[in-house]
Image: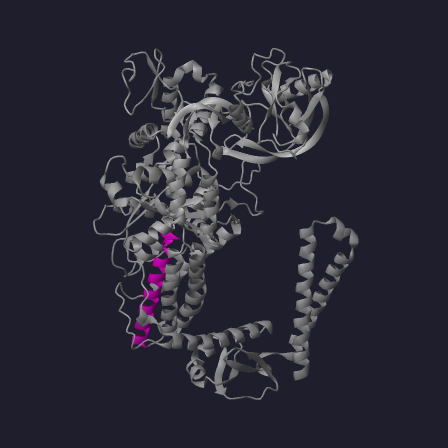
C-alpha cells in the first residue's frame, strides 16, 4: 500500500528532512556529463556580512525555480554558490567590533587585523549559506566558492597583470570619490545621489589691481581654500577684457588668475565659476587644461588640513560656518540663496562623498566598454525585460575610468611593488624578490586592496577554475542565466560583461533576468531606519519555505518591484494545505501501489476534460518558464490545482470512486494519479518540499521528483471538443449554484431543472453531473420552456429554468429580503451622511474618504439586487 500522509501538513516536520535527503542523494551535484546540454547559473554572491533578507529570498527563489526546471528537462545543470568578501562592509564590521574592545587597526597591524578578519569570516561567513539552504536552494554545495579563496585570488592577479601589461590598468593622480567615513576611495557606481536642501553663497573676488571684482556663487564655500583660478567662457562678451587678470582670493589672499574655458555655462548664474581642481571633477579637468596648481584642503576624514591654521582640524561643515562668517566680515559675502541639489553619498554608509585628487589605480574603460556594448547590441546577451538595456548602455557609453584601489586591508592586495631606490613599479602575479628595473631588494608592496567588484566581475569564470583550462570551465562556460536586481546593473552586470569578453573572448552569460525590489505592503523600500524589514526565516518558521517561495513567485514580473504582504504568504500556506488534502484523498482511494495505465478508449467525458486541461497546462507553464514569465506560470498552476482539479475534478470523481463499477473506479484512479503526479512535477520548482513529500507517497518510479522527467505536451491528450462540451455543462452548474445562493436555497433542497438549448446531447450526457453538483432532482432538455413561475439563468450555451415554488418559501424569503433591505438602507444613509459632511471630506485622509465612497457604491448595488429579488417574488405570488 502507498504511504499514508499525516492529517495536517507540517512544513517543520518535512522541510529539513527532505533537504537532507536531497543532499544525501547528491541531486544538486553537477557531473560534467559529456553530450548533455548544459545550463549554468552563478549565484550573485551575498556578502559574508549578510543575513538573509527578502531581496536574497526573491533572488534565490527565482534562480532555484529555473535550475530545478532545467534539471527536470534533462539538462546537465550547475548552480554555483558562494560568498563575497565585501571589503568595505566587512572591514567596517570588524573595526566596529574592535572599537568596542578599545583596539584600532594601527594597534594590531595589518597581519593581526587580517587574522581577525579570517576568524570573523569563519564565524559568520557561512551563516547566510545555511539560511539559503532553508529556502530550498539546490546549489552544488560541493563547488561553493569565496571571492578571496585561492582560485579566485589567482584569477584576480592574472587579470590585474594582463590588463597592466596591455596598458589598461595604470596608476595616476585623478579626481576620485572619497568616503570620509569609510576612509577609502569608491567608484562612480558606488555613489548614490540624493536630493538635499542647501544654499548658494554669492561671493565677491576682487581684482588685485583694485579695478573692481567678479561675483560668483558656490554650494561649498569651504573649498574656496583650494581655489587656484576663476573661469569664464571665452565667448562671453561680458568678460573678454578680464581674461588673464588676477584676483585676490578672499580670506586666503592668494593671487589667482582668470582663465577662459568652454566648460563654463554663460547663462548659468553670473557666468563666472571658481575653480578648485582638488575637489571637483570638472574643475580638475579645467586645471589640467590650464596647468593649474592642485591644492588639497581636506584630510582623509574631511577635516581642514594644517595648511590653514585658523580652520585646521575643523570638520568640513563646521569650517563652512566659520568661513562664511569670515567672508561676511571681510565684505566678500553678497547674499545667501536657498538651493536644492543632488549630492553624492556613499552607498555603504550614506556619508556625503568628497571629490578629491588622489594617486590611485585605475582601469582604462573605453577600450573595454566598446565590445561589451556591441555584444548586447548584437544579441549575444539579452536583458529580460529588454528595457534594462538602456541602463546598461547609459553607464557604459558615459563611463569614466574605474578607480579600483581601496584604502583597506581586507581584500585582494594590489600586486604592485615600489622600489625605494629607483622609483619603478614592479607588477607581478608572484611576489618579487627585487626591483625588475634596478635589481634593488628595497621594494615594498602597495598597501591598498582592490575594489570588491574587481573580483566579483570575474565570478562567472573564476568560479569555474579560470585561468586554468579546467573541465568545469570548458564544460559549463559561458553560463546561461544571470538573475539579479536592477540596482546592481552598473556595479556588477556590466563589469562581468566586459571582464568576460576581455579575458575569455566570450560573453559570460546569454541572458540577464532582472527582478525588482521587494517592498513592504505600503510600497516603501525595506530598511533598518524604517523598521519595516521582514525576516524571511521568521516567515519560513511560521508558514514554511514553500509558502514563502510561492508568494514571492506569484505576481512577480521581470524588472518590476513587488510588495510583501503577509496575507499572501498565508494564502500560499492554505494552498499547500489544499494540495496536501487532495493528496490524502487520492491516497485513501488507492488500493495498491500499482495504478493501471490510462485506457484512452474507455475514459469518460470528465476524464477527457481534465486530461485536455492538464495537457494545455503543461504546454503553457513550460512556455512561460522558457520565457521567464514565472509569475504567469505559477498563477496558472494555482488556478488549475485549486479550481479545476480540486474543486471540480475530485468532486466529480467521488461518485465513481464510491460506486460499485470496478472498471470505472480504476479509470478514475488512473486519471487522478496521472494528472496529480504531473501537476506536482510542474509545481515542484516553485514548491519543492511539499511536492517531494507527496510524490514519494504516490506510486512512482525513480528516487526523487527533482530528477524525474519534466512533463511533455502529448497530442493524444488533446480533447478540445470534449473540453468545450464539458465546460458548457460546468457553466450551467455554476449559474444554478450562484442563483440558488442568491436566493438562500440550501443544497439539500432539490428541484427539477429545465434547460433550453441547441446542445441537447451535451446536457443529456451531463444530467448526472447537474443533479449531483447543482442539487437538481431531474434534468429536462428542450428547445424552449414556459417561464412563468420559474427563475431563469442564462449561460452562453443554454437558458436554465428552475421552478421557484419548489425552492423558496415566498413568505419567509420576502421577510428575509425586507430585513436585509432595511439594513442596507440604514447603511446607505450612514455613508451618505458621512460623505455629505464637508468637515469629514476635507480633513480625513484621501484614502479613507475613497474607502467610504467604495462602501456606499457596494451598498447601492446591494439595494438594487434586493429590489429585483423582492419584485421577482411579488410577481410570482
Question: Horizontal and vertical percent for residue 788?
Answer: 61, 87
Q: Main secondary structure of the magenta part?
A: helix
Image quadrant for the N terminus? Answer: bottom left
The residue at the point 57 percent across, 31 percent down is: 263
Question: Horizontal and vertical percent for residue 828?
Answer: 72, 63
Image quadrant for the C terminus? Answer: bottom right
Up-down relation of residue 747 to residue 111 (above or below): below
Up-down relation of residue 690 to residue 272 (above or below): below
**In the image shown, does 762 or 191 lie closer to the viewer?**
191
Per the rendered image, the range of residues in magenta is 661-690
The residue at the point 53 percent across, 45 percent down is: 519
**In the image shown, does 797 or 620 lie closer to the viewer?**
620
Residue 442: image quadrant is top left
Q: Magenta segment: does it hold 689?
A: yes
Which residue reaches farthest front?
A: 241
Q: How is the image coloured?
A: one colour
Q: Magenta segment: does it hold 245?
A: no
Up-down relation of residue 822 to residue 201 (above or below): below
Q: How many marks?
A: 0
Residue 877 seen by the camera: no
Residue 429 seen by the camera: yes
The residue at the point 32 percent across, 61 percent down is: 711
Which residue reaches farthest left?
A: 34
**In the image shown, does 15 or 271 lie closer to the viewer?**
271
Question: Horizontal and vertical percent for residue 370?
Answer: 40, 40
**In the image shown, does 709 or 806 lie closer to the viewer?**
709
Question: Horizontal and vertical percent for residue 183?
Answer: 49, 23
Amino acid at each position: 500500500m502507498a504511504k499514508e500522509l499525516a492529517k495536517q501538513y507540517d512544513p517543520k516536520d518535512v522541510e529539513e528532512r527532505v533537504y537532507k535527503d536531497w543532499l544525501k542523494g547528491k541531486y544538486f551535484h553537477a557531473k560534467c556529463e559529456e553530450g548533455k546540454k548544459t545550463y549554468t547559473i552563478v549565484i550573485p554572491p551575498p556578502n559574508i556580512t549578510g543575513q538573509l533578507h527578502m531581496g536574497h529570498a526573491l533572488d534565490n527563489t527565482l534562480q532555484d525555480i529555473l535550475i530545478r526546471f532545467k534539471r527536470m528537462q534533462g539538462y546537465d545543470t550547475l548552480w554555483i554558490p558562494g560568498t563575497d568578501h565585501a571589503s568595505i562592509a566587512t572591514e567596517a564590521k570588524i573595526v566596529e567590533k574592535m572599537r568596542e574592545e578599545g583596539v584600532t587597526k594601527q594597534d594590531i597591524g595589518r597581519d593581526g587585523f587580517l587574522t581577525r578578519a579570517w576568524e570573523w569570516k569563519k564565524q559568520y561567513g557561512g551563516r547566510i549559506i545555511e539560511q539559503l539552504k532553508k529556502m530550498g536552494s539546490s546549489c552544488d554545495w560541493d563547488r561553493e566558492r569565496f571571492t578571496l579563496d585561492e582560485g579566485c585570488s589567482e584569477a584576480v592577479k592574472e587579470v590585474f597583470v594582463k590588463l597592466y601589461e596591455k596598458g589598461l590598468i595604470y596608476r595616476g593622480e585623478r579626481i576620485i570619490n572619497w568616503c570620509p567615513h569609510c576612509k577609502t576611495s569608491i567608484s562612480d557606481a558606488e555613489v548614490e545621489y540624493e536630493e538635499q536642501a542647501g544654499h548658494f553663497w554669492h561671493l565677491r573676488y576682487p581684482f588685485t589691481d583694485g579695478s573692481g571684482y567678479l561675483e560668483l556663487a558656490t554650494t561649498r564655500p569651504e573649498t574656496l581654500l583650494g581655489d587656484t583660478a576663476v573661469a569664464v567662457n571665452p565667448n562671453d562678451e561680458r568678460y573678454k577684457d578680464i581674461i588673464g587678470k588676477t584676483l585676490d582670493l578672499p580670506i586666503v589672499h592668494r593671487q589667482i588668475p582668470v582663465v577662459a574655458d568652454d566648460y563654463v555655462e554663460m547663462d548659468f548664474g553670473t557666468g563666472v565659476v571658481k575653480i578648485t581642481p582638488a575637489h571637483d571633477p570638472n574643475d580638475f579637468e579645467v586645471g589640467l587644461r590650464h596647468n593649474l596648481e592642485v591644492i588639497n584642503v581636506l584630510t582623509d576624514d574631511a577635516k581642514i588640513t594644517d595648511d590653514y591654521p585658523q580652520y585646521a582640524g575643523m570638520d568640513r561643515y563646521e569650517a563652512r560656518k566659520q568661513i562664511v562668517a569670515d567672508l561676511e566680515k571681510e565684505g566678500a559675502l553678497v547674499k545667501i540663496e536657498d538651493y536644492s541639489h543632488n549630492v553624492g553619498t556613499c552607498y555603504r554608509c550614506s556619508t556625503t562623498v568628497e571629490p578629491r585628487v588622489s594617486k590611485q589605480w585605475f582601469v582604462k574603460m573605453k577600450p573595454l566598454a566598446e565590445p561589451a556594448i556591441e555584444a548586447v547590441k548584437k544579441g549575444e546577451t539579452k536583458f529580460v525585460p529588454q528595457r534594462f538595456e538602456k541602463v546598461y548602455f547609459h553607464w557604459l557609453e558615459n563611463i569614466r575610468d574605474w578607480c579600483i584601489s581601496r584604502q583597506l586591508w581586507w581584500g585582494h592586495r594590489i600586486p604592485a611593488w615600489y622600489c625605494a631606490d629607483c622609483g619603478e613599479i614592479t607588477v607581478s602575479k608572484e611576489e618579487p624578490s627585487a626591483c625588475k628595473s634596478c635589481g634593488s631588494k628595497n621594494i615594498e608592496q602597495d598597501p591598498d586592496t582592490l575594489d570588491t567588484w574587481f573580483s566579483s566581475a570575474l565570478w562567472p569564470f573564476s568560479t569555474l577554475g579560470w585561468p586554468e583550462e579546467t573541465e568545469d570551465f570548458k564544460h559549463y562556460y559561458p553560463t546561461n542565466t544571470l538573475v539579479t536586481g536592477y540596482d546592481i546593473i552598473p556595479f556588477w552586470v556590466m563589469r562581468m560583461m566586459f571582464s568576460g569578453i576581455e579575458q575569455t573572448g566570450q560573453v559570460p552569460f546569454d541572458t540577464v533576468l532582472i527582478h525588482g525590489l521587494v517592498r513592504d505592503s505600503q510600497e516603501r523600500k525595506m530598511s533598518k531606519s524604517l523598521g519595516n524589514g521582514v525576516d524571511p526565516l521568521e516567515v519560513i518558521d511560521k508558514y514554511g519555505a514553500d509558502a514563502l517561495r510561492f508568494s514571492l513567485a506569484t505576481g512577480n514580473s521581470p524588472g518590476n518591484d513587488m510588495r510583501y504582504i503577509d496575507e499572501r504568504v498565508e494564502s500560499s500556506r492554505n494552498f499547500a494545505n489544499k494540495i496536501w488534502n487532495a493528496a490524502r484523498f487520492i491516497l485513501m482511494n488507492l488500493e495498491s501501489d500499482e495504478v493501471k495505465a490510462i485506457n484512452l478508449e474507455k475514459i469518460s467525458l470528465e476524464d477527457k476534460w481534465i486530461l485536455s486541461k492538464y495537457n494545455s497546462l503543461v504546454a503553457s507553464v513550460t512556455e512561460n518558464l522558457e520565457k521567464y514569465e514565472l509569475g504567469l506560470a505559477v498563477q496558472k498552476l494555482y488556478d488549475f490545482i485549486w479550481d479545476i482539479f480540486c474543486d471540480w475534478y475530485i468532486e466529480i470523481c467521488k461518485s465513481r470512486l464510491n460506486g460499485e463499477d470496478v472498471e470505472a473506479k480504476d479509470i478514475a484512479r488512473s486519471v487522478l494519479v496521472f494528472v496529480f503526479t504531473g501537476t506536482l512535477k510542474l509545481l515542484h520548482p516553485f514548491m519543492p518540499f511539499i511536492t517531494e513529500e507527496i510524490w514519494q507517497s504516490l506510486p512512482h518510479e525513480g528516487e526523487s521528483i527533482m530528477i524525474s522527467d519534466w512533463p511533455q505536451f502529448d497530442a493524444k491528450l488533446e480533447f478540445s471538443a470534449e473540453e468545450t462540451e464539458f465546460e458548457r455543462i460546468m457553466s450551467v452548474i455554476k449559474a444554478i449554484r450562484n442563483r440558488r445562493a442568491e436566493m438562500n436555497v440550501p443544497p439539500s433542497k432539490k428541484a427539477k431543472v429545465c434547460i433550453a438549448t441547441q446542445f441537447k446531447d451535451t446536457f443529456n450526457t451531463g444530467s448526472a453531473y447537474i443533479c449531483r453538483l447543482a442539487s437538481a432532482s431531474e434534468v429536462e432538455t428542450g428547445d424552449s420552456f414556459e417561464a412563468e413561475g420559474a427563475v431563469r439563468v442564462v449561460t452562453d450555451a443554454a437558458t436554465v429554468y428552475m421552478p421557484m415554488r419548489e425552492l423558496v418559501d415566498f413568505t419567509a424569503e420576502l421577510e428575509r429580503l425586507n430585513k436585509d433591505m432595511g439594513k442596507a438602507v440604514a447603511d446607505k444613509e450612514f455613508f451618505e451622511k458621512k460623505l455629505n459632511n464637508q468637515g469629514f471630506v476635507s480633513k480625513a485622509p484621501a484614502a479613507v474618504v475613497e474607502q467610504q465612497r467604495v462602501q456606499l457604491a457596494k451598498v447601492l448595488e446591494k439595494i438594487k439586487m434586493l429590489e429585483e429579488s423582492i419584485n421577482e417574488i411579488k410577481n410570482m405570488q
